[in-house]
Image: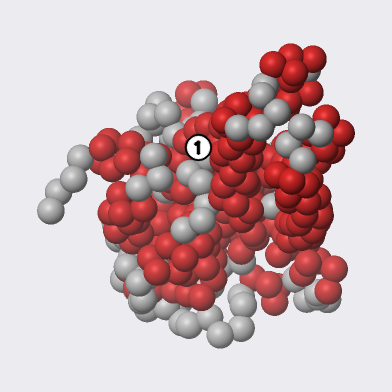
Amino acid sequence: MHSDPTDLIHRAQQGDRAAFEALYRAHAGRVYALCLRLTADRAQAEERTQDAFVRAWERLATFRGESAFSSWLYRLTVNEVLLGRRSERRREQRIVTTADPAALERPPGAEPASGGALDLERAVAALPPGAREVFVLHDLEGYRHEEIAALAGIAVGTSKAQLFRARRLLREALNR
Amino acid sequence: MTGPHMDAQLNEYVDGTLAARDRASVDAHLAECAECRAAVAQLRSLAAAAANLPKSIEPARDLWEAIDQRIRHRATGNVRRVSRRALAAAAVLIIALRLYRLLSPSTAHYPPAGQGWAAVQADFDRASDQLSGILAVERERSRPETVALVERNLAIIDAAIAESRAALARDPASAELRRLFAAAARQKVELLRWAARVAAS
């Protein structure tokens, strides 16, 4: 059954959970893919997907239709993931130190790549978190560096540096 | 050679974000440097591969049930929240008007017993129930200790209201008992108003 997305959004804004479920069904795959690529972890991606839809429900009234609902939802998802990541990073910085920065470049357990889309997915998942986030947002999702900088709380120059680093690591991984 | 500086330039070149003059300079370099031409080809191939990755990946399990559980008692945002706040304000106003009628000198116009006085109490009960209902919905938003505090105090005030109401039933003409009832009712209004404000903030 096809429902008018505008009608679904309007009904969901009035508190209709069935309409919101239809919106979930229409966008879950896209939101989950975004969460999975940003976190590189299935369990975390499931959690973040749930968080994103719960937040979307809470903030539905603020959606005025100036942009597509999908763009609004995906940006909200990115915010949820990056906010979670930033608080996680603050925790890690308190408890993790490493004398070998190169160890962060190639996380243990990263699978060797041998070409093809699956290998690119694996190589992206094996990137250091900061580089992975910028690569996913810029090269897969089409965000500009200024937008990424604002969303991730980093400088535009840092966003560019992370992207170039990600691409270099990916080229190395895929050429191996 | 593709050093760090050239690496950034080649990335910007592929992204199309270089100024025209810098772009011409990279074009000139590429005409002479096979290594950089290969790097540009790889960057373009990577960009194409990234663009071809599936946009959608279905989660291994259905997440809707968990989401539905979490949103079941939550409002959808400002519109519903504002309307609840407006309803709460309206309910407080209704109760305040009833109390004004109870406490004002015109109270004497109400017959000591019977429909007039009973109607005032019934109006108060309805408005009070309405505000309590709004608070029950907002309960999810409030901190558990706030909910516990409100419920504890409401129980005390409701007991005082019930006592003065029972006494009024025995002695309907007593101005003192009416004042006692009105004072307890006013306390309830103040508490509900405070709780509504805390829940909506």
Q: Is residue B143 above or below residue A120?
A: above
Task: Tell me where residue A64 sits by quadrant.
Answer: top left
Identity, as a three-letter code, of the amino acid under mark 1: Arg
* Colour logic: secondary structure
Q: Nearer the viewer, residue B45 or A40?
A: A40
Residue A135, relative to residue B183: is it above or below?
Answer: below
* Residue A81 screen position, x and y as percent: 57, 57
Q: Nearer the viewer, residue B155 or B90?
A: B155
Task: Write the residue at 40% across / 45% down.
Answer: A15
- Judged left or right of residue B83, residue B110 is right
The answer to which of B196 and A162 lies nearer the viewer is: B196
Farthest left residue?
A1
Where is A150 relative to B52, above or below? above
Residue at 73%, 25% (x, y): give it: B102
Task: State left or right for residue B65 relative to residue A38.
Answer: left
Circle 1 residues within 10 Å: few <14, some 14–19, many ≥20: some
**How far across and down, in percent of the image, does residue A133 sit?**
55, 56
Place of residue B192 in the rendered image (x, y in percent of width and height, measured from the top left): 72, 41
Quarter holding the C terminus of chain A?
bottom left
Label 1 resides on the chain identified as: B
Q: Residue at x 62, y 46 (%)?
A: B132
Horizontal placement of A126 versus A13: left or right?
right
Q: Is residue A39 visible?
A: yes
Q: Position of residue B168 (x, y in %)?
A: 75, 42
Q: Residue A167: in sight, yes or no?
A: no
Secondary structure beneath label 1 = helix
User: In percent of the image, x 42 and y 78: which residue is there?
Assistant: A113
Q: Which sits in the foreground, B55 or B153?
A: B153
Q: Pointer 1: what residue?
A: B80
